[in-house]
Image (spheres, coloured by chain):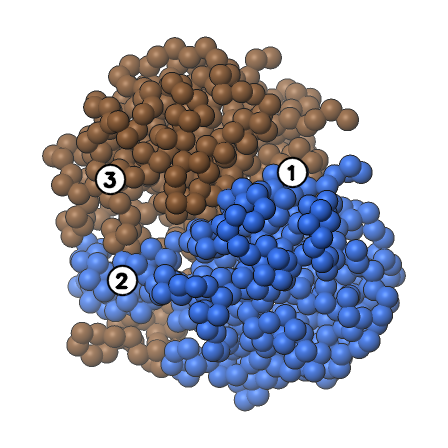
Chain colours: A blue, B brown
Amino acid sequence: MTNRKRVVITGMGVVTPLGHTVAEMFANLLEGKSGVGPITHFPASGFPTNFAAEIKNLDLGKYVSAPGRYDASGSNTHFALAAAQQALADAGLLGSGKFDRSRIGTYLGVGEGAEDFSSVLAACSLSVDATGYKVNQGEIIGHLSRLLHGPREAEGEMNTTAGHLADEFDLGGPNSTTLTACAASAQAIGEAAELIRHGDADVMVAGGTHSMISPFGVTGFNLLTALSTSGTAPKQASRPFDLNRDGFVLGEGSGMLILEELEHAKARGAAIYAEFTGYGTTGDAHAMTDPHPQGRGAIRAMRDALRNAGLQPHDIGYVNAHGTSTQANDEIETLALKTALGDAAYGIPVSSSKSMLGHLIAAGGAVELIISILAMRQGVLPPTINYDTLDPLCDLDYIPNCAREKPGIRHILSNSFGFGGQNIVLIASRY
Amino acid sequence: MPARRAVFTGLGLLTPIGSTPEAFWASLCAGTSGIRRIQRFDPSALRCPIAGEIPDFDPKAIITAAMKDTRKSLNKMAHTIRLGLCAAQLAMTDVGLQKGQIDPFRFGVEFGCVMAATDLEDLCKGAQTSCVGDPPEVDYTIWGRQGLKQVPPLWMLKYLPNMPACHVSILFDAQGPNNSITSTDTAGLLALGEAFRHLARDSADFFLVGGCDSKINPVAIARHSLFHDLVHDQPADPTTAIKPFDAARNGTVLGEGAAVLGLEELAFAQKRGAKILGELVGFASGFDKGRTGTGLAKVIQNALRDAKISPADVGHVNAAARGSRELDAWEARAIRDVFGDVPVFAPKGHLGNSGAASGLIELAASVLALQHGQLPGTLNYTTPDETCPVNVTTGDTQPIAKPYAVKLSVTDLGQCAAVVVKRWES
């Protein structure tokens, strides 16, 4: 433990509903702006929940020299290319042949969502058998073969985003992709840091990318009844920790960090944003959707991350909560924070960026770690907006509605919990 | 503190050529192919109507009535996810780890898996309600108002790639690290490598590491037929369709299956008297830009360095070769560069390409080969190809004496992973 390699963060990039640069996003967060509005990507007005925080006006040509190569790719790849280019440029690591590229890898949390759902539905409707309840499986293959677009389906394979990043930016090192639902990009960052600590790479482009604001994603989450249905005031729908919260709001985007071995960063004179110090990872082993009622996996993950960082609860100056705005998450996360951090919990400001950005699902953890690092560096904490009514079960300091100055923070903690029970906790520290 | 070593202590397999380690091994040695005309549905509309299909998978024979809650959950799992869960149950029986023998937080789960294609009956009614016009197109306003109500509420969760690891963790109360790697054909080896690192850094004592995948359903196979390099002009005999490294190779065939391995810290395994099947000693991954072979060779060398051995110590390479003209040649160049004339076995000739499941199913072949001291022949390899300058095994099994094997996985984009395994000698 004592002689493990140290990992620092030397670059960051984002594509979010509140800005396509780290600076723009953070400024909007400090102003308490919401990125939520009616869904415009497809005609969604018939869905029970038809609002989300969308990415608008992303120009891929600003980030890659031949954007046409990615015409068949989905949003996941487009967002990731843009965020990774920003992060690599920020770190001074853009450019083929610069440094040993076989020691620079990528580890991403990449969401699903590239399926051509419309064609699958159309093909289904053409292939119903005599019972009316089943599809003729042999027949539908012919319809699908005609309706689906080959290059687009190829891009729907889950390894394509990490493959394109490696190819576009010449990253010959470790190459991995995870999808542990809402924990994915945080998990990618934690495991990428471990690759560096072990000596498998000097630099990792780590983060996540996801859009579920598609017919597939909006269908899936509406069916799970996990989304807020407060459609009369979409910007107020995501209200983490508030008594009247009623579900999360979908967002989309990407966050990428450059994780780098400390000596490698120093040797090339890189600017250092923060040190990556703690990683905790557990499984709830409880249920497909609901978190464990006592938050046992979340508690253990926070404790493991603190131990991994060699810190005590009172060392933490800010918590960026998973804070989804669902009844279950916010209540149980609060309980888990109080159990894991003990008495210190009441003195640590906690906020949920999802109140403004919506839930970026597989990309959420990465964007939220970036926000936490900016908060630590700038000494000002982004708020939880739409916080009006106290929930007796959620009684921590959630930084309600207005950003708050808090200089001198030395360590931040960011939670990400996924459907399926994965709990990921990351800690970053002032370098 | 001495280094923490990782050993295999159990194996669960569901494959087109056998669903016990014994049956799987016997088929590999006998040259039995699992490729046949698809029987699960009428494949006539496919240009490549053959696949490596598991002939006898029955989840209820594995998830018995005594496992009440898990059995109830089976209807919330796509076929792919059932494969992963069932292989885990088979592996756990083989491992023999009992509840109470391990701290649940020291029990991790890692899977290689990708999003499964939707079951059509889930969408059938809603699609009829919501598709209008000729040719029909979905009207999302109708779909949102009415169609949605005709779809099962947990629909999306039936297909998510983290669900095998989720269900496995619930079944065995595994509360340690839990990850699901989705990098298609390299996913299984990446999951294994990550679990290996967890054990080494003392964040767990035991892992179930698995891979599961199936493309043998109408949506997945229609999709893959559009972009995957599947054989065309398939021969009258499907068992000869896939020809790794052979001069006459002309594409691959899709497969399905699952493999789950118990991976355990050595001292922990010895303390509980576990049976040890082999040792995992090296891992690396990377990206070979332009698939020149240089990047893949570097990944192999990194895995050998991780294992602290040299190429001359390796008795066989277990290749990813799937019968692709270009990818097989790419892989062969890298193997030749690193190893020269080492024997190379390519199990996809027997199995087809089972994607995220392929790495660990095929790795099982090498673990068994090291145990038996015998290496199977590569199926359908008859004519060497100068673009694939490697020593491909063929025909009957041949004896192997050296204790190390290297398993490779690659994707068509250039992602690669390598692991090094060692015969166990107590």
Residue A149, numbered circle: 2
Q: Quadrant of residue A382?
A: bottom right
Question: Do dots 2 and 3 share one subunit?
Answer: no
Which residue is farthest bottom?
A232
Residue A74 in picture, x, y percent from top left: 40, 64
Disc 1 residue type (three-letter): Gly
The image shows residue A347, relative to residue B34, as above or below, that is: below
Q: Quadrant of residue A102?
A: top right
Disc 3 residue type (three-letter): Gly
Q: Quadrant of residue B248?
A: top left
SS category of the residue bearing label 3:
loop
Taking the image as shown, residue B412 lies to the left or right of residue A150, namely right
Residue B286 in picture, x, y percent from top left: 50, 41
Residue receiving disc 1: A199
Of labels 3 and 1, the one closer to you: 1
Residue A276, numbered circle: none
Residue receiving disc 3: B251
Residue A256 in picture, x, y percent from top left: 59, 60
